[in-house]
Image (spheres, rainbow, N blue to C red):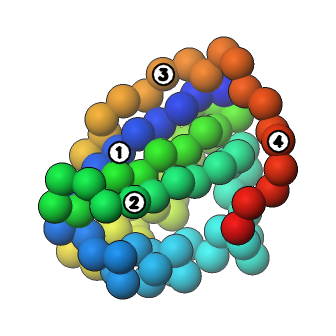
Amino acid sequence: MAISVVAQVRDLTAEEDAALLQALNLAGSPPGGGQIRLAGPAGGGRRLAGVWDSDADYERFRDDRLMPALSGLGRALQLIEKRPATETVRIIPVT
């Protein structure tokens, strides 16, 4: 079942988020099961949101790629919400 994930990274700047994206190489090496990533300023840092094919896909990405990359920036991830995404529709690719 697909899931939606919302997380916060305190004190993460837009420039650091750009560096994080580069380190994650999402376009060159897409994570299995990752459908969309959204990010923007919130609460003195960045709010990250995504949709994943399954909880296992998200947890694998989080543990193997996201957490090491954030650790390299000296930042921690705060999970805000993880819920089933029972209705998902892919409309158009966005970059």
Kindly report the distance in space between the C-alpha atoms of the residues bearing marks 4 and 2. 21 Å
Kindly report the distance in space between the C-alpha atoms of the residues bearing marks 4 and 1. 24 Å
- Please count the marks in the image: 4
Kindly report the distance in space between the C-alpha atoms of the residues bearing marks 4 and 3. 21 Å
For label 3, the SS is strand
Q: Nearer the viewer, mark 4 or mark 3?
A: 4
Q: Position of residue 68 (x, y in %)?
A: 39, 68
Q: Check contact, mark 4 vs mark 3: CB within 8 A.
A: no
First in sequence, mark 4 or 2: give its number: 2
First in sequence, mark 1 or 2: give its number: 1
> As rendered, which of 19 and 41 lies closer to the eye?
41
First in sequence, mark 4 or 3: give its number: 3
Q: Check contact, mark 1 vs mark 2: CB within 8 A.
A: no
Left or right of 9, for residue 28: right
Categorize mark 2 by other alpha carbons within 10 Å: few (<14), some (14-19), many (20+).
few
Visible in this render: residue 19?
Answer: yes
**Which residue type does callout 1 highlight?**
Ala
> As rendered, which of 31 and 18 lies closer to the eye?
18
> Which residue is drawn at the image coordinates 36% and 84% (left, top)?
15
| Residue indicated by mark 1 | 7
| Residue indicated by mark 4 | 91
**Which residue type does callout 3 highlight?**
Arg
For label 2, the SS is strand
For label 1, the SS is strand
| Residue indicated by mark 2 | 40
Q: Check contact, mark 3 vs mark 2: CB within 8 A.
A: no
| Residue indicated by mark 3 | 83
Q: Nearer the viewer, mark 1 or mark 2?
A: 2
Left or right of 3, for residue 17: left
> Which residue is drawn at the image coordinates 30% and 35% (left, top)?
80
